[in-house]
Amino acid sequence: MAKDNRLKAFLLRQDIRYEGRANWNAEGAWAYRYPAKVSRHLQLRLEKLPAEVQAIGWKAQVRLASGIGS
């Protein structure tokens, strides 16, 4: 009996975690609804970083802004 209760509690926690993750993904995707770009403020900050680091960051921005499965 106690084992059944633990299993139910475990499954409930997993369901809550899944729902929260799904909601977070939708909110995160909303931030990337526009094409990737670099604002003037960000450009000034990026000038202090090595070119390799800038390239890695830009590649990630383009990938995220392109949409999943696009």
Image (cartoon, grey):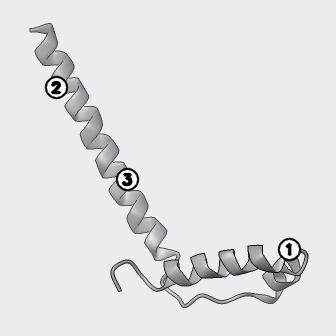
Mark 2: few/some/many CA within 10 Å (<14, 14-19, 20+): few
The residue beneath circle 3 is: 21
> How far across and how far down the image is residue 51, in percent?
81, 80
Distance from label 3 to label 2 (Cα)? 20 Å
Distance from label 1 to label 3 (Cα)? 33 Å
Q: Earlier in the sequence, mark 2 or mark 1?
A: 2
Residue 1 higher or lower than 70, as above or below: above
> How far across and how far down the image is residue 65, in percent?
51, 83
Q: Secondary structure at mark 1?
A: loop
User: Residue at image x 48%, y 67%?
Assistant: 28
Residue 27 higher or lower than 30, as above or below: above
Name the kind of residue labelled 1 in the image: Leu
CB of mark 3 within 8 Å of CB of mark 2? no
Query: Residue 12 appears in which quarter of the rendering?
Result: top left
The residue beneath circle 1 is: 49
Query: Residue 13 appears in which quarter of the rendering?
Result: top left
Mark 3: few/some/many CA within 10 Å (<14, 14-19, 20+): few
Q: Nearer the viewer, mark 2 or mark 1?
A: 1
User: Residue at image x 33%, y 58%?
Assistant: 22
Name the kind of residue labelled 3 in the image: Arg
The residue beneath circle 2 is: 8
Q: Nearer the viewer, mark 1 or mark 3?
A: 1
Distance from label 2 to label 1 (Cα)? 50 Å
**Placement of the C terminus among the 4 image quadrants:** bottom left
Q: Secondary structure at mark 2?
A: helix
User: Residue at image x 11%, y 17%?
Assistant: 4
Name the kind of residue labelled 2 in the image: Lys
Residue 70 higher or lower than 27, as above or below: below
> How far across and how far down the image is residue 16, in percent?
30, 41
Q: Is residue 55 left or right of residue 29?
A: right
